[in-house]
């Protein structure tokens, strides 16, 4: 469960400068700092696999894009979310080279991996905030329900395609990407 830190409201500028001397990660939700729980190992394995796959496709196509884990995205006046994966242009990254990695312009793609405590946040809150921030494509990877949702922004709202098993992920941002839901979910398994 995420914990709200204190009762004092925080501006977006204060959030960018906030440092409590720990490695804790926070999101800014309605002006309040919300402590993020550490991810599960399954979550980390899946996020690494997706990042590696997207980076390989960026390199293969020689695209002027970068792929980051745990970068921030401003989603409102007093809102900022920490993404599992986001793809941005090199120009967007250059603007933040020596600043907090919180993008104030929409990334090309955001991916979230669902954990037990993040179900509402990933499916409900981030979905509406990412649409309002005009992020054109948003993936929700759900290892709990063994599915992957691809959301594409259409006239301010997300149109959702739910994929399972051996279905291929069809991305407008990465139209030549060859990746199935099983490949993504299997990345979260450890052979014993």
Image: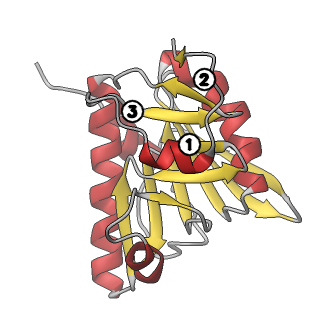
- Quadrant of the rendering where the C terminus is positioned: top left
For residue 99, say whether it is visible: yes
Identify the mark nearer the N-term, 3 or 1.
3
Identify the mark nearer the N-term, 1 or 2.
1
Asked which secondary structure carries label 3, the reply is loop
In x, y percent, where is residue 140? 57, 41
User: What is the crowding at mark 2: few (fewer than 14 residues within 10 Å), some, or many (at least 20)?
Assistant: some
Q: Which residue is mark 1?
A: 81
In x, y percent, where is residue 117? 52, 16
In x, y percent, where is residue 184? 38, 44
Placement of 99 over or under 138, stated as above or below: below
Image quadrant where residue 60 sits: bottom left
- The mark tally for this picture is 3
Q: Which residue is mark 2?
A: 119
Q: Nearer the viewer, mark 1 or mark 2?
A: 1
Q: Residue at x 73, y 32 (%)?
A: 124
Image quadrant where residue 105 sits: bottom right
Whole-angstrom CA distance, mark 1 to mark 2, is 15 Å
Considering depth in this image, is 69 or 42 the residue closer to the camera?
69
Q: Residue furthest right?
A: 155
Q: Which residue is mark 3?
A: 25
Asked which secondary structure carries label 2, the reply is helix
Q: Do residues under tags 3 and 2 come within 8 Å of each other at their CB atoms?
A: no
């Amino acid at each position: 469960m995420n914990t709200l830190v204190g009762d004092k409201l925080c501006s977006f500028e204060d959030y960018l400068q906030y440092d409590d001397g720990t490695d804790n990660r926070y999101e800014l939700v309605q002006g309040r700092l919300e402590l993020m729980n550490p991810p599960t190992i399954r979550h980390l394995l899946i996020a690494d696999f997706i990042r590696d796959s997207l980076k390989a496709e960026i390199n293969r196509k020689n695209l002027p894009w970068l792929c980051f884990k745990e970068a921030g995205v401003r989603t409102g006046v007093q809102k900022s979310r920490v993404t599992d994966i986001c793809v941005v242009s090199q120009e967007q990254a250059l603007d933040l080279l020596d600043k907090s990695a919180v993008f104030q312009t929409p990334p090309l793609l955001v991916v979230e991996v669902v954990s037990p405590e993040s179900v509402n946040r990933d499916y409900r809150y981030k979905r509406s905030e990412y649409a309002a921030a005009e992020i054109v494509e948003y993936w929700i990877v759900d290892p709990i329900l063994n599915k992957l949702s691809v959301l594409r922004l259409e006239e301010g709202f997300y149109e959702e395609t739910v994929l399972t098993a051996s279905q291929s992920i069809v991305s407008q941002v990465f139209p030549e990407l060859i990746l199935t839901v099983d490949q993504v979910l299997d990345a979260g398994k450890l052979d014993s």
